[in-house]
Image: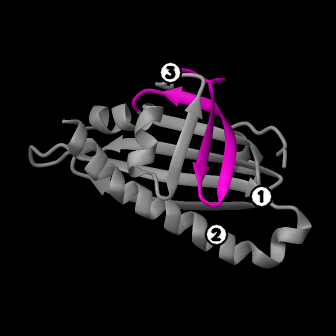
Amino acid sequence: MKLEPSTLELLDTAEFTLSTDVDLAASIDEVWAVLADNTSWTAWFHNCTKMTYSHETWTEAGQLRTITSKPFVIEEVALAVDEPNRWAISLLATNLPMAKSMIEVLDLTDTSRNGEERTEVKWTAAFDLPAYLLPVRSIAETILVRTWGKSLEALQDAVIARR
């Protein structure tokens, strides 16, 4: 199922937005290194079993990848790769109905304090749904927030493993 092309403007115009965040005991550069490394996603992203990509490490907008996170197979394009603060993608196509248009953004903020390096990672999804998916919106939202919440918590372990 193809989705409508999206830009970062969808953050301001979408019918629906969701977010969750986590504060990690790691430097912003360490967290960024794991996020930008497409080869690492199967180790920390919830239910991710396969990743194919045009670039092993995302460095600029326009780069492509396909992520398999059961039950979904999702084709994505990078919208923003602003090291080390913002990573954003637009969904291009999915194997299952999901949205008319959708972007996902990860914003990283240095929250270091008292000599301890820390990074807040905030995930935001902005999307428009086709009318036939509106009745299951709350279920979809719960699944998305739960998936990203678990994934962001697992990101800590991936950062530690990379050290």
Name the residue at the front extreme: 49
Viewer-nearest of discs 3 and 1: 1
Using residue 142 as the reference point, say whether residue 31 is left or right of it. Answer: left
| Res 106 label | none
Residue at which label 2 appears:
141
What is the three-letter code of the residue carrying label 2?
Glu
Mark closest to the chain's N terminus, 3 or 1 = 3
**Quick one: label 2, few (<14), some, or many (20+) residues within 10 Å?**
some
Q: Residue at x 60, y 59 (%)?
A: 70
**Quick one: label 1, few (<14), some, or many (20+) residues within 10 Å?**
few
Residue at which label 1 appears:
96
Mark closest to the chain's N terminus, 2 or 1 = 1
Q: Secondary structure at mark 3?
A: loop
Mark closest to the chain's N terminus, 3 or 2 = 3
Q: Picture coordinates of residue 96 (x, y %)? A: 77, 58
Q: Which residues are magenta?
A: 59-84
Quarter of the rendering containing residue 117: top left
Q: Secondary structure at mark 1?
A: loop
Rounded to the nearest angstrom, the CA distance separating label 3 from label 2 is 29 Å
What is the three-letter code of the residue carrying label 3?
Thr
Using residue 159 as the reference point, say whether residue 84 is left or right of it. Answer: right
Residue at which label 3 appears:
59
